[in-house]
Image (tube, rainbow, N blue to C red):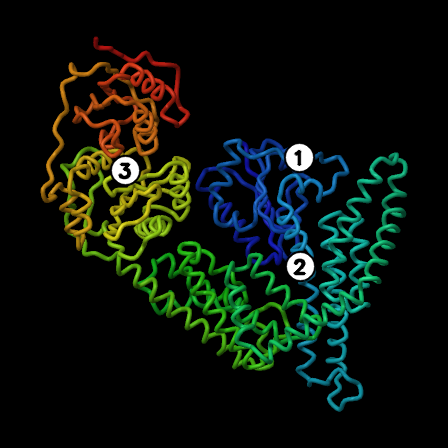
């Protein structure tokens, strides 16, 4: 049995790595696909991919923000994405692989092609730089954490307990201080070496390590380390390519003698020459940050807090975190206090909000909220991601405000945190532990109140008394979906199309009709073709590829009397969101469009004040409205044809839109009827009325045209039916019955 291979890895190797692993395994189980996931975490590689694992596979998914030795998959179908995509879109990634849509990774496993060169063909240059930088960070962090904590522990015997001249001197404290300082002293060289290693492999590591040592010696610090790392990596990549033509017998000489010598010499000279200017720049930046801590802790706290909660462990968060980590190596313990406080706050916001505002969250969310107590207390920001992903435009700004409050208070209180990770586990090492906890709780409570109020308001707008018995818009039919008042909610604030999609998707998710992945399918559908029907009605739904995210067939209706810009000058006031496991939605579409095509619908929707008003509209109780009359007799048309619908999912919005587009090309008056349901004859240039036919696969559609180009119109319509109406499932022409009237 074929399987999918996956590799995950994030810079710290703590949270994102294993969240992506779990998401991919869950998605694979849902799709009934076997998967093996290798994790490149803080403790090393686990569940490593072997050559045997690469036999009989669909392809490989690499969800990583660090070097994971991707060249071993050269020649195989490979999808390479950031680790966050593995968390948020595992279903899409797996589906793409098993459908054979993954590109073949270039390069040869046996060739001495560098990792950097291969990546250059796969990714943007900016993406490469980020991965190389994060590779350095991930390998440096253990040294910083271990060294920082040992130094901090030595202070428990007194601030001068490591000094032999001090009365506080303690041999244990002195030993811990010495070990910790040694770990700190190689922080920059390790950082630099692994940046270069990520680019050029082992030759780059040698030159990078020496460049990092010289950055320490010259005082260039972490800024010099970054310069040395990238310079060493790309220089040695160039040297290796330059020497690639040497005979194989010189391979050992090249790798052990020539390349290390050239690399160390060139990068060493460069860092000696650049050391002083870079040191001045580095010291100036450190001095500016130190002065900012004293002069304007509010501004610094706002910037740090916003960065840490902008992407919850992503590149912006990492920029603040890495800066704080590197400053620890230079003896600045104040900056990390604000960074840690800002990173701890988001999961605590979630935990407190779900605890004290339970009515604003689903049972599943409340359970996840309890887990965030543990994640927050241990400095794992990523626990907030699932909640932020559901409503990013509202939740992320709230989190940024909450984190900023925590960071501002930490800087204002001049708190020092000597370790870059650990959360509340390192409280004994914090200069003012009790006050620091209060600072974090203040920001967390502020965020929890805002989030809780937001969720109560959102759910309040959707809470409408449910009628005990179903109320149907038209008489019930087989597979019909019944609408209750509780399925209808008003939103008088939303004005942006994507916000509307998120709101209706959330309503369906809360009702356990869909999983969160369905929203992506709805967005993809809108990108393919608008789901606006006309008459102020839009029917957003997912693509066939997102049908796996439908847990139960159902409908949610959002009423927006103020109108939403649906693009192309179209204003939607009734949003009928559909989740269908099969073709059940075609029945409700036909019934709804039959009613909603009447005159006066838009005016009635604008005047509607509650769910019962909307139900009356759906029942056809519209002032001054009247059913549409049957059109002229067939004999009055110049040409006609009968076509069998071959689309697997029937005449839903997308094929209907293409059919209408085809018909609108012609001057003739063109009418359609569904012979299998004995429908009314409808205007073929009206999308809503075409959808109202409710045609399913195998149904016969009778098309009638009257006008100067009637014959040509019928021919083009016949070709559109044969092509599958844009869904690529057409067949050979099926010889439709076509008649031309003289």
Q: Residue furthest top?
A: 742
What separation in Å lies between label 2 and label 1 (alpha carbons)? 27 Å
Q: Residues within 10 Å of mark 1 (few under 14, many from 20)?
A: some
Above or below for 628 versus 418: above
Q: Are marks 2 and 1 in contact (CB under 8 Å)?
A: no
Counting labels gives 3
Above or below for 49 versus 302: above
Residue at disc 1, secondary structure: loop
Above or below for 67 versus 93: below
Residue at disc 3, secondary structure: strand
Above or below for 407 versus 547: below
Pointer 2 residue: 137
Indicate left or right for 522 with 443 as reference: left
Q: Earlier in the sequence, mark 3 or mark 2?
A: 2
Q: Earlier in the sequence, mark 2 or mark 1?
A: 1
Number of the front mark, 1 or 3: 3
What separation in Å lies between label 1 and label 3 (alpha carbons)? 45 Å
Indicate left or right for 422 with 399 as reference: right
In this view, the residue in front, 68 or 172, is 68
Pointer 1 residue: 106
Q: Where residue 280 sits in the image (x, y, percent)? A: 75, 70
In this view, the residue in front, 270 or 354, is 270
Q: Residues within 10 Å of mark 3 (few under 14, many from 20)?
A: many
Q: Where residue 708 sits in the image (x, y, percent)? A: 26, 16
Pointer 3 residue: 533
Q: Name which quarter of the figure residue 447 lies in.
A: bottom left
Q: Where residue 678 sits in the image (x, y, percent)? A: 17, 24
In this view, the residue in front, 147 or 399, is 399
Indicate left or right for 742 with 454 as reference: left
Q: Name which quarter of the figure residue 682 lies in.
A: top left
Q: Residue at x 78, y 64 (%)?
A: 215
Q: Earlier in the sequence, mark 1 or mark 3?
A: 1
């Amino acid at each position: 049995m074929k399987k999918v291979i996956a590799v995950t890895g994030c810079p710290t190797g703590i949270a994102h790595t294993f969240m992506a692993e779990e998401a991919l395994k869950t998605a694979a189980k849902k799709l009934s696909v076997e998967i093996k996931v290798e994790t490149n975490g803080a403790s090393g590689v686990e569940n490593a991919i072997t050559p045997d694992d690469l036999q009989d596979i669909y392809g490989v998914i690499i969800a990583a923000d660090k070097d994971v030795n991707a060249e071993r998959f050269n020649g195989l179908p490979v999808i390479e994405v950031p680790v966050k995509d593995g968390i948020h879109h595992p279903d899409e990634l797996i589906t793409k692989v098993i459908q054979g849509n993954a590109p073949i990774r270039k390069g040869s496993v046996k060739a001495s092609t560098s990792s950097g060169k291969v990546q250059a063909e796969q990714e943007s240059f900016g993406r490469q730089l980020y991965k190389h930088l994060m590779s350095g960070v991930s390998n440096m962090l253990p040294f910083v954490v271990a060294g920082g904590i040992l130094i901090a522990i030595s202070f428990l015997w007194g601030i001068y307990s490591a000094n032999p001249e001090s009365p506080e001197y303690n041999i244990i404290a002195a030993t811990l201080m010495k070990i910790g300082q040694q770990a700190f002293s190689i922080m920059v060289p390790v950082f630099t070496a692994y940046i270069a290693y990520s680019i050029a492999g082992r030759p780059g590591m040698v030159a990078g390590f020496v460049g990092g040592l010289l950055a320490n010696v010259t005082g260039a610090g972490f800024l010099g380390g970054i310069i040395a790392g990238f310079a060493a990596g790309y220089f040695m990549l160039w040297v290796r390519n330059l020497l690639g033509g040497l005979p194989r017998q010189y391979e050992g000489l090249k790798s052990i003698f020539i390349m290390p010598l050239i690399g160390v010499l060139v990068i060493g000279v460069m860092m000696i020459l650049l050391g002083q200017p870079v040191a001045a720049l580095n010291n100036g930046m450190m001095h500016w940050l130190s002065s900012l801590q004293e002069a304007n802790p509010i501004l610094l706290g706002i910037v740090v807090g916003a960065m840490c909660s902008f992407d919850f462990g992503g590149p912006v968060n990492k920029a603040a975190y890495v800066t704080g980590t590197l400053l620890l190596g230079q003896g600045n313990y104040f900056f990390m206090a604000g960074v840690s406080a800002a990173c701890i706050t988001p999961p605590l916001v979630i935990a407190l909000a779900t605890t004290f505002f339970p009515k604003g969250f689903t049972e599943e969310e409340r359970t996840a909220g309890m887990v965030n107590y543990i994640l927050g207390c241990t400095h794992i920001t990523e626990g907030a991601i699932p909640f932020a992903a559901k409503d990013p435009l509202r939740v992320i700004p709230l989190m940024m405000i909450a984190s900023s409050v925590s960071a501002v208070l930490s800087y204002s209180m001049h708190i020092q945190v000597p370790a870059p990770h650990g959360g509340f586990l390192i409280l004994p090492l914090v200069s003012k532990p009790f006050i620091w906890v209060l600072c974090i709780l203040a920001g967390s409570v502020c965020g929890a109140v805002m989030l809780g109020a937001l969720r109560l308001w959102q759910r309040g707008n959707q809470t409408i008394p449910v009628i005990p018995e179903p109320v149907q818009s038209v008489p019930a039919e087989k597979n019909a979906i019944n609408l209750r008042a509780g399925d209808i909610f008003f939103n008088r604030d939303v004005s942006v199309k994507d916000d509307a999609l998120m709101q209706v998707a959330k309503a369906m998710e809360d009702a356990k009709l869909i999983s969160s992945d369905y929203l992506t399918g709805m967005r993809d559908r809108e990108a393919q073709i608008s789901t606006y029907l006309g008459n102020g009605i839009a029917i957003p739904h997912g693509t066939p590829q997102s049908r796996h995210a439908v847990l139960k067939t159902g409908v949610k209706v959002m009423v927006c009397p103020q109108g939403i810009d649906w693009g192309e000058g179209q204003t939607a006031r009734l949003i009928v969101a559909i989740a269908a496991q099969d073709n059940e939605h075609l029945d409700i579409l036909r019934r709804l469009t039959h009613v909603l095509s009447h005159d006066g619908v838009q005016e009635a929707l604008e005047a509607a004040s509650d769910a019962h008003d909307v139900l009356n509209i759906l029942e056809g109780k519209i002032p001054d409205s009247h059913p549409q009359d049957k059109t002229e007799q067939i004999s009055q048309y110049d040409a006609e044809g009968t076509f069998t619908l071959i689309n697997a999912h029937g005449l839903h919005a997308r094929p209907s839109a293409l059919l209408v587009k085809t018909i609108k090309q012609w001057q003739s008056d063109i009418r359609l009827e569904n012979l299998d349901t004995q429908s009314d004859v409808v205007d073929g240039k009206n999308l809503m009325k075409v959808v109202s036919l409710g045609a399913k696969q195998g149904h016969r559609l009778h098309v009638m045209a009257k006008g100067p180009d009637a014959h040509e119109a019928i021919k083009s319509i016949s070709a559109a039916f044969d092509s599958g109406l844009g869904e690529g499932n057409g067949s050979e022409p099926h010889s439709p019955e076509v008649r031309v009237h003289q």
